[in-house]
Image (tube, rainbow, N blue to C red):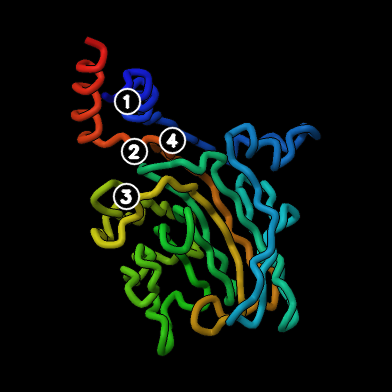
Amino acid sequence: MISSTLLLAFLPLVLAKSKSKSIYMDFSTYDSSNPDNTAQAFLANNTIIINNYTVDSTSDPNSRTYTAANVDIADGYLTLKVSGGTANGSSVPSAAIQTNDTNILYGTFKTTAIASKVPGVCHGFFTYKNDCQESDIEILTSHFTTGNDRITPGLQLTNQATSCNSSQNTRDAIPYPQDPTAAAHEYTLEWSRKSTKYYFDGALIATMDTNVPYVPSAFLWNSWSSGNVNWTSGPPTEDAILRISKIDIKYTTSSAQRTFGTTLSTLVLIPLLWWALV
């Protein structure tokens, strides 16, 4: 006979509920006159953390190092800088931030930003658990209107293959409706169980219903270069700065245990618990 104690132990996993959260940051409200109000403190107060780590080079000419020194808030913008002048073979100083929550499961993520005009950089706004659970909006500053044999110019949109076979990625490149370097534009990723939808200044530009991530993840913003001519090109010869004026995200979180709690589990375990108790 199934123990009622055992069933009671599983019941919270089945009934676990997601939690709705939101983060809104308008960087024009940042008060730089307060010496205690550093960029790091401002972001931390909004449950955003700055990344500090190195992505080692494998097939790329350069590795990249995400460093807090390249993250700042100035003149009403959060700035993510890729330092210029990195020699071939050296690590490119880059910038990245992410949500403190790493268990995000679906949401709407809006970023209002001005892209750098400096070639050789990738700006990214994306969900990330691993390379097989990732949905991206990416701006390649070497490929606004011109591409190469491997890159179609435009705004790069990708669901990484959940099979971990990159040749099966779901991707598209959309011509920019407006110049992304001339003014701030809103880039939106809407992630649901069935699809990822992408918007530019509120207008839908693409929908993908294959390789949709399904694992709880973080949301990240970054700016980087690897020197790979088949993606970022570069590294940049001068500082390339992504300027973000607003971040507005609404999402739900889910504990890892909740992936156990399917509707079927609920329908099976609750009657079993009733039977065991009576």
**Residue at (65% x, 58% y) in the render:** 95
Q: Secondary structure at mark 2?
A: helix
Instruction: Give the residue at mark 2.
Output: 260
Q: Nearer the viewer, mark 2 or mark 3?
A: 2
Q: Nearer the viewer, mark 2 or mark 4?
A: 2
Choose the circle earlier in sequence order: 2 or 4: 4
Q: Amino acid at mark 3?
A: Gly
**Residue at (26% x, 12% y) in the render:** 277
Q: CA distance from mark 4 to mark 3?
A: 31 Å
Instruction: Give the residue at mark 4.
Output: 255
**Residue at (39% x, 73% y) in the render:** 166
Evaluate if marks 1 and 2 touch, with contact meaning CB atoms under 8 Å apart.
Answer: no
Asked whether 236 or 224 is in front, the reply is 224
Q: Secondary structure at mark 1?
A: helix
Residue 174 visible (yes or no): no
Q: Which mark is residue 202?
A: 3
Asked whether 54 or 15 is in front, the reply is 15
Asked whether 254 or 149 is in front, the reply is 254
Relative horizontal placement of residue 2, taking residue 21 as reference (left or right):
left
Evaluate if marks 2 and 3 touch, with contact meaning CB atoms under 8 Å apart.
Answer: no
**Mark 1 neighbour density, 10 Å: few (under 14) some (14–19) many (20 or more):** some
Q: Amino acid at mark 1?
A: Leu
The number of numbered discs placed on residues in the rendered structure image is 4
Q: Nearer the viewer, mark 3 or mark 1?
A: 1
Instruction: Give the residue at mark 1.
Output: 15
Evaluate if marks 4 and 1 touch, with contact meaning CB atoms under 8 Å apart.
Answer: no
